[in-house]
Image (cartoon, grey):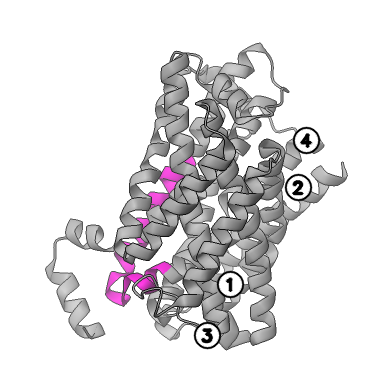
Amino acid sequence: MSEVAAAVAARRRPRWARFAAVAGPGIVVMLADTDAGSIITAAQSGAQTGYRLLLLQALMIPILFVVQELTIRLGVVTGHGHGWAIRKHFGARWAWVSVATLLVACVGALVTELSGIAGVGALIGIPAWLSMAIVVVGLTVMAVQGSYLTVERIALAVGLFECVFLYVAFRARPDLHTAMRQALAIPVGNPQYLYLVAANIGAVIMPWMVFYQQSAVVEKGLVVADLRAARWDTAVGSVVTQLIMGAVLVAAAATIGRTGTGQSLDTVQQIAQAVTPFLGEINGSMMFALGMIGAALVATIVVTLTAARTLGEIMGFDHQLAQSPREAPWFYAVYMLTLVLGGALVASGVDLVRLSVAVQVMNALLLPVVLGFLFMLARRALPEPYRLKGGYAVVVAITIALTAGLGLYAGLAGILG
């Protein structure tokens, strides 16, 4: 269907139908954003600083939307993924620099996702090796047998389990006066607080999100006529992901914070016990397990697909779920190898909580590279009607500079302090 025919067809459909047809990539990537590492980071933030990082969760909503809106604009208008765009406009060397950054972030993220699943398995007595085997086999079958829409629907279904954290936060009965007072009390001179600031920024804006959403809108076949609905898809996802992050932080602050902040959570089991005391041992553990599994699985799907797709864009091999393993052997090989290596590493044992927070800090330190390329592409790769320009370009530049700068400063201050 041509762009003109697509635009005419889009205008004839009711708005809700347009949104339903287009929605998916934005909500999926945002549910993946609230991954196992992000949930652990939010819980650790609430345990150690009370509600003092709650305001940051709200402030990240418009920042997250501004960043991801550029990715959908680039994908819908150019019809190409992020890695391909960097290669075309900046050359192969810079493309590999960007992909190296992405792969480092993907490896770190994948280990935290699979570790989160292993931690939940441990809650019900399943050994790590068995949890990893189930996940690797299940997600491999899903990719090989399913289309893009099938994978998207599975990711949406499992990701929505994260919403149980909203109920957990409500049942924790947070003190609103204390929450407001602590949220406005910002200890900027505390290295531990700054380290968690960097971790939370890195937990919200991750390198693989930029690559995934741009490739996803291309693979789904979205066109310029779908741009408005795709923006709403991203806006809704931005709000949902930060509500979940805030809910986990509130639940940890309302439980551990009642006996004094500053405590550290060391295992997934400890986090489950801390944030679910008002739900009963069985119900609380069940709800936490559903939320964590949903968060970890949707992020695992997104991260592994991102690594395989982006390498395909850079190296020139076929890289879409619409193609069979025979048609795109390298794509599926990279996808499966990434899963197997991540599962094997997790099965060997790893300190999940420390690793998860450290991975989010690493994401914050990588933001100048990722957001820098994104901004330059929005200024260079897009045709005139859709190019980032004028006053909005200034606003985006300031937003990106402040976000990347704060993440870099807070991360280094926290590490060195």
| Disc 3 packing (10 Å; few <14; some 14–19; many ≥20) | few
Q: Which residues are magenta?
A: 216-243
- Asked if residue 397 is positioned above or below residue 341 in the image, the reply reads below
> Disc 3 marks which amino acid?
Gly
Residue 410's tag is: 2
Q: Residue at x 42, y 78 (%)?
A: 386
> Disc 4 marks which amino acid?
Gln
Disc 3 versus disc 2: nearer the observer? 3
Q: Which residue is mark 3?
A: 316
* 1 or 2: tag closer to the N-terminus: 1
Report how far apart the C-alphas of labels 4 and 1 lie in the structure: 31 Å
> Disc 2 marks which amino acid?
Ala
User: Do labels 4 and 2 touch, CB within 8 Å?
Assistant: no
| Disc 1 packing (10 Å; few <14; some 14–19; many ≥20) | some
Residue 375's tag is: 1
* 1 or 3: tag closer to the N-terminus: 3
**Depth order, front residue of 52/316:** 316
